[in-house]
Image (spheres, rainbow, N blue to C red):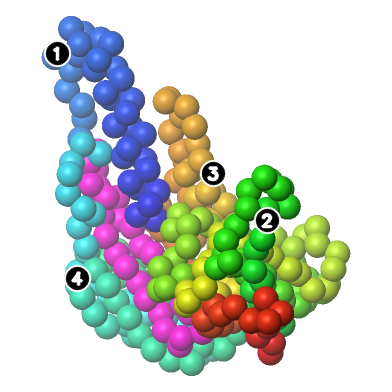
């Protein structure tokens, strides 16, 4: 969400600079109204590491240089399967709790802040695991044959078994040396038009010999998928006068942000050259 807010501020700032440069005389007495701060709630319930994290902040005026200020003293409760799990403050604006979160379960998050209560519901689907994770040495690019690679360049291919007769939504992430590859990449998949049981995906990023790689496969509900796709659309909105819409929130009360409960699989490995130029990690 912070990515979207920064993008929004940047685009609006460009518009203002453009008008100021072309209409300097007319703008001399113009006073830009100060926008009211909006509440932002970003929440993730992660079954892979048995944690839930909620970050609460407020937006700032788009001409301000300050970071989004955190919101403290919130009371947050997670409800699921007749369980009420309270979250505790870990730092300013950040609240956490740990538990074993079952999949195929609905989760309701209640956030009480500044005298108001905001709620969001997220469904955590059944876990989908990798069936195979492999890396192969690259010698050339099939799309651009003129591009040649050295002896240390590899790509990674992820495979997983997609449950049939139901609609599933996924997000794939890859970390190289503890850093998220393509930081702003929101790669999400909708299996509506997939016909094969086993899906294969090769991230559009190369890795190198000696790198430590971690890959994640996250499964979540349709609302989370729509949130990520609208966020992508907002980030890719073009034109000096085209302002992006806010990504679709599932919180009540008109606040920004989203609550996502997800299950998934996580694999880590190190890249080495081998005789067959391939490393395979199967379930």
Q: Report x, y in % for residue 205.
A: 56, 59
Note whether residue 162 is visible.
Answer: yes
Task: Out of 114 and 69, give the one closest to the viewer.
Answer: 69
The span picked out in magenta is 35-61
Local packing at callout 1 (Cα closer than 10 Å; few below 14, some 14-19, many 20+) is few
Q: Outermost residue toward the right?
A: 195
User: Which residue is under mark 2?
Assistant: 140
Residue 233 tag number: 3
Answer yes or no: is residue 249 visible.
no
- 4 or 3: mark nearer the eye: 3
Q: Position of residue 148 (x, y in %)?
A: 63, 53
Of the image marks 1 and 3, the number of the one nearer the N terminus:
1
| Disc 2 to disc 4: CB gap under 8 Å | no
Q: Residue furthest top?
A: 25
Residue that carries the numbered disc 1 in the rendered image = 28
- Mark 1–mark 4 Cα distance, whole angstroms, equals 40 Å
């Amino acid at each position: 969400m912070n990515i979207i807010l920064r993008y929004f501020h940047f685009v609006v700032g460009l518009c203002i600079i453009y008008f100021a440069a072309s209409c300097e005389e007319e703008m001399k007495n113009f006073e830009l109204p100060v926008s009211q701060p909006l509440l932002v709630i970003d929440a993730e319930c992660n079954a892979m590491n048995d944690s839930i994290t909620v970050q609460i902040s407020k937006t700032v005026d788009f001409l301000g240089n300050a970071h989004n200020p955190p919101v403290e003293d919130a009371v947050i409760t997670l409800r699921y399967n007749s369980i009420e799990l309270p979250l505790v403050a870990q730092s300013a604006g950040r609240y956490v709790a740990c538990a074993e979160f079952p999949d195929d379960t609905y989760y309701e998050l209640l956030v009480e802040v500044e005298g108001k209560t905001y709620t969001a519901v997220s469904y955590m689907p059944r876990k989908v695991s990798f069936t195979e994770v492999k890396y192969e040495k690259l010698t050339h690019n099939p799309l651009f044959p003129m591009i040649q690679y050295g002896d240390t360049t590899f790509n990674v291919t992820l495979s997983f078994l997609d449950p049939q007769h139901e609609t599933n939504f996924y997000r794939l992430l890859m970390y190289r040396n503890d850093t998220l590859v393509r930081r702003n990449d929101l790669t999400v998949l909708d299996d509506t038009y997939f016909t094969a049981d086993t899906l294969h995906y090769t991230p559009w990023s190369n890795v190198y010999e000696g790198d430590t790689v971690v890959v994640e496969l996250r499964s979540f509900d349709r609302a989370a998928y729509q949130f990520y796709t609208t966020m992508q659309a907002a980030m890719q909105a073009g034109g000096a006068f085209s302002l992006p819409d806010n990504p679709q929130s599932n919180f009540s009360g008109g606040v920004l942000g989203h609550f996502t409960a997800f299950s998934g699989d996580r694999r880590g490995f190190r890249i080495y050259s081998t005789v067959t130029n391939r490393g395979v990690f199967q379930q």
